[in-house]
Image: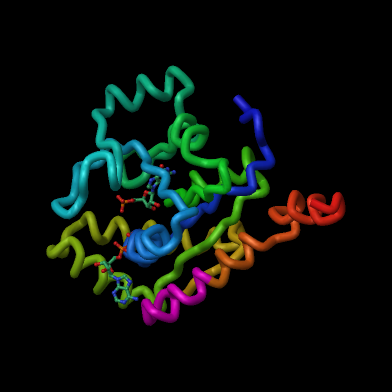
Amino acid sequence: MKSKNPDRFNIIVISGPSGSGKSTLINRLVSEHRDIIFSVSHTTRAKRESEIYGKHYHFVSEEKFREMIAHNEFAEWAKVYQNFYGTSRDEIEQKSGNEKNLVLDLDVQGAANIKREFPSALFVFIVPPNLAELKKRLVAREKVIDSHIETRLKTAIKELKQYHLYDYTVINDKVEEAYAVLKSIYTAFNNSTYKKQKMIENILEGR
Ligand code: ADP
Ligand code: 5GP
């Protein structure tokens, strides 16, 4: 089902391989901008120790997730590393709009689906400086080297090949520099002619 507002221009999609630094950069962007809200996805993956229910994800059973798919409750969903992840239509409808920008942390399949439905959204790709550094960051985060990390590294290569889907790329080598780039991209997006249309019309009408 198509959304009522396919030209939604207040959606920011951020993707990148697991461990590339999406959460780190998104958390900072959200905490420093009152007009940016994080879209909380549903997932069937187990909660990490540092994560909070309802803040990082809505953690649900596979049964519940399938029920939501059957009721067409997702704007997009995908199976990533044997788990389901999805953005509910409710999340988009309730949180975006009113001068707010909604940030979606999505895998490349989800980004492609959102692009079909919301072509005016902003698409940003977060990329690690190299694969060895990516592995180091994954190990440091997960604290163990297991097949789970090897799967994420293999998927990273597949995801990196989809770079052409995105409007901008942020290389996350030094986090401060990467964040500065992301912030500039956001500033440009927020000042696009498309977004300033209403303001220009007001000026023309002498308001
Ligand atoms: P993602 O959300 O893309 O899976 P995270 O933001 O969780 O990635 O980052 C993965 C790990 O790498 C975290 O432990 C984070 O603190 C660390 N990290 C993120 N950016 C950098 C960076 N530029 N340099 C070093 N470590 C980083
Ligand atoms: P993680 O398990 O590391 O939090 O996320 C794994 C992958 O799932 C990441 O690539 C992340 O961007 C993606 N992801 C998180 N939420 C969603 C979602 O709602 N939809 C889709 N398609 N991918 C998601």
Screen quadrant of the N terminus: top right
Query: Quarter of the image holding residue 129?
Result: bottom left
Residue 41 sits above or below residue 201 on the image: above
Q: Is residue 175 visible?
A: yes
Q: Is residue 156 visible?
A: no
Which of the colour schemes (rainbow, by chain, secondary structure, one colour) is used?
rainbow
Tell me: 20 left or right of 114: left
The span shown in magenta is 172-183
Which one is in front, 59 or 78?
A: 59
| Picture coordinates of residue 153, whole percent (x, y) | 33, 63
Which residue is rendered at x = 58% and y = 67% of the image? Answer: 187
| Picture coordinates of residue 152, whole percent (x, y) | 31, 58
Which one is in front, 89 or 66?
A: 89
Which residue is rendered at x = 79% and y = 56% of the image? Answer: 200
| Picture coordinates of residue 42, whole percent (x, y) | 34, 36
| Picture coordinates of residue 89, whole percent (x, y) | 49, 31
Tell me: 44 left or right of 168: left
**Type of secondary structure dominating the magenta stretch:** helix
Residue 200 sits above or below residue 98 on the image: below
Residue 129 sits above or below residue 96 on the image: below
Which residue is rendered at x = 56% and y = 72% of the image? Answer: 184
Residue lying farthest to the front in this orientation: 207
Which one is in front, 12 or 129?
A: 12
For ligand 1, give the image quadrant: bottom left
Which residue is rendered at x = 33% and y = 65% of the image? Answer: 24
Please tell me whether residue 156 belongs to the stretch shown in magenta.
no
Q: How many marks?
A: 0
Please tell me whether residue 178 belongs to the stretch shown in magenta.
yes
